[in-house]
Image (cartoon, helix red, strand yellow):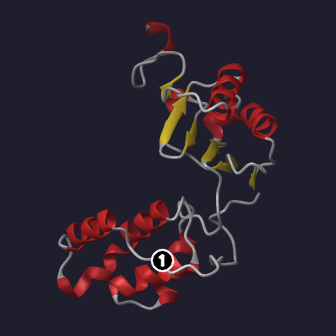
Amino acid sequence: MHHPGTNNKVYQKINENFEWSKDNFDKITVILKKYPSNKIQSAVIPLLDLAQRQNNGWLSKNSMEKVAETLSMSYIRVLEVATFYSMFNLEPIGQNFVQICRTTPCWLRGSDKLSKVAQEVCDTKIGGTSEDKKFTVVEVECLGACCNAPMIQINDKYYEDLDENNFRKLLIDLKSNKSIQSGSQIGRKSSQPEREF
C-alpha cells in the first residue's frame, strides 16, 4: 500500500522559495515560547504541521529546510521526523485527503467496502491521487473512533457510522463541491449505543 507519508523520495517544487506566511510566523513565535530556549528543536512536529498546512497538505524539501533553519537544526534531523510519522505527507496530495481506517473494528463493520466505494467514486486506486487532483485515498491504521466504526478522516474531520450508501453520497457531494456534515452519519451523539437514539 502506498501512502504519501511513507516514501523514500523527497519532492521539491521547482523554483520554490518557501517562506513562512505572516500568520504562521506569528504562530511560530507563540509555539517557541512554550519551550526552553535550549530546547526549541522540540517544536519540530508543530512546525512541520504548520509547514505542511501552508504547503497545500504536503512537505516539500524546501519547506522542511525552512523548518530546519527556523529551529537551528540540521535538515536531516527534520527529515528523520517527517519520515517517521505518517501524518506528514512527502508528496503532493489531492484537495480532499481521504484516510480510510482499516483496523479491526472498522474492518469488521465494512471498511473494505468503503475502500471499494472510494476507489470507484474518487476515480483512483488506494494510495493514489485522482487526475483532477480532487482526491487522494489511502488506508490507515486506527483513527481512534472505534465505537462508531467504520469511520474515515477527510483532511482534519472525522466521518463516522458509515456504510456504502452514505459514504458514496458523502464523496459525490464532495466531488460536486457541496458542503458535507462531519461526525456520525446516522445522528449518533458521541459514542452512545446505536439503539438509544
Image point 57% across, 24% down: which residue? Answer: 161
Q: Camera-side residue: 135 or 183?
A: 135
Depth check, front residue: 26 or 117: 26
Q: Quadrant of the C terminus?
A: top left
Q: Is residue 59 above or below residue 193?
A: below
Position above or below: 61 against 27: below
Q: Is residue 55 left or right of residue 102?
A: left
Give the camera-side residue of 59 and 87: 59
- Residue that badge 1 annotates: 18
Amino acid type of the residue that numbered disc 1 sits on in the rendered structure: Phe
Q: Position of residue 88 (x, y in %)?
A: 54, 64
Judge the density around disc 1: few (<14), some (14-19), many (≥20) Cα neighbours within 10 Å.
some
Q: Residue at x 57, y 74 (%)?
A: 60
**Quadrant assignment for the N terminus:** bottom right
Q: Position of residue 75 (x, y in %)?
A: 49, 88
For the residue pair 66 and 87, the one nearer the viewer reads as: 66
Residue 176 lies, in percent from the top left, at: 66, 30
Residue at the image point whose x is 46% and y is 17% from the top: 188
Query: Measured from the top left, where is residue 17 in percent x and y?
Result: 50, 81
Which image quarter: residue 123?
top right
Q: Residue at x 35, y 83 (%)?
A: 70
Residue reaching furthest to the front = 15
Q: Secondary structure beneath disc 1?
A: loop
Query: Count the marks: how many?
Result: 1
Q: Quadrant of residue 86?
A: bottom right
